[in-house]
Amino acid sequence: METTWKEQTLETIEQRSWPEPDFDDHTGQRLYALWRTPLARFTVEDIRLLIAHKAALSHLVPLAIEKLGGNLFAEGDFYPGDLLQSVLTIDPEFWYANRPLWSSVYELIRYRDWELEERGIRADGFLELS
């Protein structure tokens, strides 16, 4: 039986290891562990954290879009919509190189600007890329 990409780890997909963290670096330890965790086990917070650290965006943004499609204001550890905010603040170079992904996110938010504003989610930089 063939393994789907979601059953693989970022370490396998990216064919590289995450740097081993300092012993007292909680975030570094978490990122190190996530790099070796199958994508199918990722929580909203796991995806948000990795995206915030600009890790493996070409693999994580599709997962984020999937989560956001089910709940635009999916919540990690901080507030409702923190995953969306992380996605919207990804570097423009990524979006220019990945227009279909940009379009998918755009379709999720295009008619919901009042909800974004009400929740304090800033999309202006993302929308300027249109």
Image (spheres, rainbow, N blue to C red):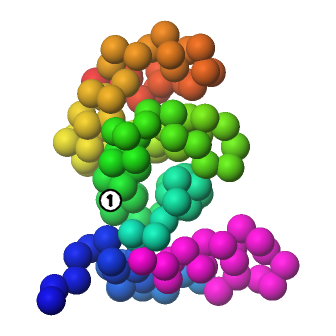
Displayed quadrant of residue 119? top right
- The residue drawn where x is 84% and y is 78% is 24
Residue identifier under label 1 = 58
Closer to the camera in the image, 80 or 116: 80
> In which quadrant of the rendered image does the N terminus lie?
bottom left
Q: Position of residue 61 (x, y in %)?
A: 37, 52
Mark 1: secondary structure: helix
Inspect the magenta stretch and tell me whether residue 27 lies in it: yes
- The residue drawn where x is 58% and y is 43% is 75
- The residue drawn where x is 41% and y is 65% is 56
Q: Position of residue 69 (x, y in %)?
A: 34, 39
Inspect the magenta stretch and tell me whether residue 129 lies in it: no
Magenta span of residues = 20-38
Instruction: Please name the amino acid that badge 1 sits on.
Output: Ser
Closer to the camera in the image, 129 or 106: 106
Q: Position of residue 116 (x, y in %)?
A: 51, 20
